[in-house]
Amino acid sequence: MSKPKGPPPGGPFLVDSRGCNYDIPYRALLPTKVENLLVAGRCHSATRGAHASTRVTATAMGEAAALALSKKSTPQEIRGAEVRELLRKSGGGPFTR
């Protein structure tokens, strides 16, 4: 595998010119075949462009793990809306839903 030379076409950053936010679904942190495990960043399957966004999912993963522990449940039993609400309350991101 060769290392890419220079930034990708269009520059090193992707900007949504419409100013829109988008969500990364909680299910993206949940492996389909392993229970009681969360993955974040480059540990999951995604396109190169998607990895640029998902590299910041570690905060959500930490909140989900703490929530599962406090409820004595698995991450798979936690609702994404609960994690989003915890992040919103702590100032973890701009959430529109």
Image: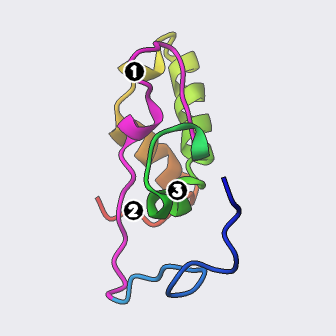
Against 4, residue 84 (above or below) is: above
Q: How is the image coloured?
A: rainbow
Instruction: Estimate the x, y position of residue 10 in percent, counting from the top left.
Output: 50, 87
Instruction: Estimate the x, y position of residue 59 in percent, counting from the top left.
Output: 61, 46
The label nearer to you, 2 versus 1, is 1
Q: Are marks 2 and 1 in contact (CB under 8 Å)?
A: no
- The residue pinned by badge 1 equals 76
Against 75, residue 73 (above or below) is: above
Q: Earlier in the sequence, mark 3 or mark 2?
A: 3
Task: Please state which of residues 7 and 69 is positioned toward the viewer in this rendering.
Answer: 7
In the rendered image, the residue lying farthest to the front is 1
Secondary structure beneath disc 1? helix
Q: Earlier in the sequence, mark 1 or mark 3?
A: 3
Crowd band around label 1 with a 10 angstrom C-alpha radius: few (<14), some (14–19), many (20+): many
- The residue pinned by badge 2 equals 95
Q: If the image is split into quadrants, where does the C terminus sit?
A: bottom left
Residue occupying image coordinates x 37% and y 84%: 19
* C-alpha gap between disc 1 and disc 3: 22 Å
Per the picture, the main secondary structure of the magenta-coloured stretch is: loop
* C-alpha gap between disc 3 and disc 2: 20 Å
Position of residue 33 in the picture relative to residue 71 (left or right): left
Magenta highlight range: 18-41
Secondary structure beneath disc 3? helix
Residue occupying image coordinates x 44% and y 48%: 46
Q: Earlier in the sequence, mark 2 or mark 1?
A: 1
Residue occupying image coordinates x 56% and y 57%: 92
The label nearer to you, 1 versus 3, is 3
Instruction: Estimate the x, y position of residue 86 in percent, counting from the top left.
Output: 49, 44
User: Does the stretch in magenta take in 21?
Assistant: yes
- The residue pinned by badge 3 equals 51
Crowd band around label 3 with a 10 angstrom C-alpha radius: few (<14), some (14–19), many (20+): some
